[in-house]
Amino acid sequence: MDEISDALARADAEAFTRRPPRTLRGQITYLIRQLGSARAVAAEIGVTADSVNRYRRGARRNPPRAVTERVEAAVRARWQPRVRARRRRRAATTGGITVETRARFGYTAPVGTTDDGRLRRLTVHLPAEYADRLFTAREAGAGDDQLRRIVAEGLRDIYFRDGGTRAPDLTDVALTDIDYIDLEF
């Protein structure tokens, strides 16, 4: 599963200043304007160009659930790109990112301390450098494992080490078994 990628996408959608089109006809019309042709939209959502034209005309109104979900996802992915880019830029330069999660954390620590993973619920604000690293890695096509490591590093430095004031020997924090994760920027 792509928990971190999905959380970033949800946080991106919170940036919308207007609602995306809600009707199937409006969504298909928007996608045709964005992609240039019914054939390109058909390739994007996995149907024929004739089906796309039927949806646009209103001749077919109730596509299968999987098609509806792909149409909605395609619209959300393209909706208000400048608004989302502005929010990501602000988070990556000054604002940072807030991580709220319930997950199992394990860590490598010196001998004599426990390193057993424990389920914790955390809400931690990470500085802009971690937001920048997350966005850069996501745009470069990084997998969820790499994004998870970036979040775990941020939580290690800010929460577990408290910005360098405690646990200096804590070397590695593993973020596993994510129950839920929400990001806000």
Image: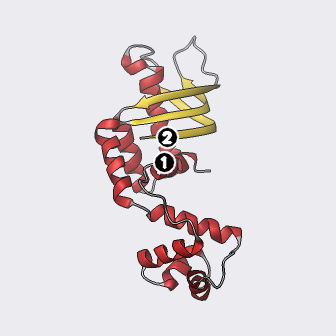
Residue 83 vertical position relative to residue 21 in the rendered view, above or below: above
At a point 38% along the width and 41% down the height, the residue shown is: 131
Task: Tell me the crowding category of disc 2: few under 14, some 14 to 19, or many 20 or more residues within 10 angstroms, Cα based.
Answer: many
Mark linked to residue 184: none
Residue 121 vertical position relative to residue 179 in the rendered view, above or below: above
Q: Position of residue 118 (x, y in %)?
A: 64, 24
Most extreme residue toward the left is: 93
Task: Tell me where residue 81 sits by quadrant.
Answer: bottom left
Q: Position of residue 28 (x, y in %)?
A: 53, 76
Q: Nearer the viewer, residue 39 or 137?
A: 39
Task: Tell me where residue 61 sits by quadrant.
Answer: bottom right
Q: Nearer the viewer, residue 134 or 110?
A: 134
> Mark 1 or mark 2, which is nearer the start of the sequence?
1
Task: Please state if 68 lies on the left or on the right of 123 as rendered.
Answer: right
Badges 2 and 1: C-beta atoms under 8 Å apart?
yes
At a point 58% along the width and 69% down the height, the residue shown is: 23
Colouring used for the render:
secondary structure
Work out how far the residue at label 2 is from the one at label 1, CA to CA, in angstroms: 6 Å
Please, what secondary structure does the residue beneath circle 2 have?
strand
- Looking at the picture, which amino acid does disc 1 mark? Leu
| Residue topped by disc 1 | 8
| Residue topped by disc 2 | 183
Please, what secondary structure does the residue beneath circle 1 have?
helix
Task: Tell me the crowding category of disc 1: few under 14, some 14 to 19, or many 20 or more residues within 10 angstroms, Cα based.
Answer: some
Q: Position of residue 140 (x, y in %)?
A: 40, 56
- Looking at the picture, which amino acid does disc 2 mark? Leu
Q: Position of residue 132 (x, y in %)?
A: 35, 43
Q: Quadrant of the C terminus?
A: top left
At a point 39% along the width and 48% down the height, the residue shown is: 135
At a point 32% along the width and 51% down the height, the residue shown is: 86
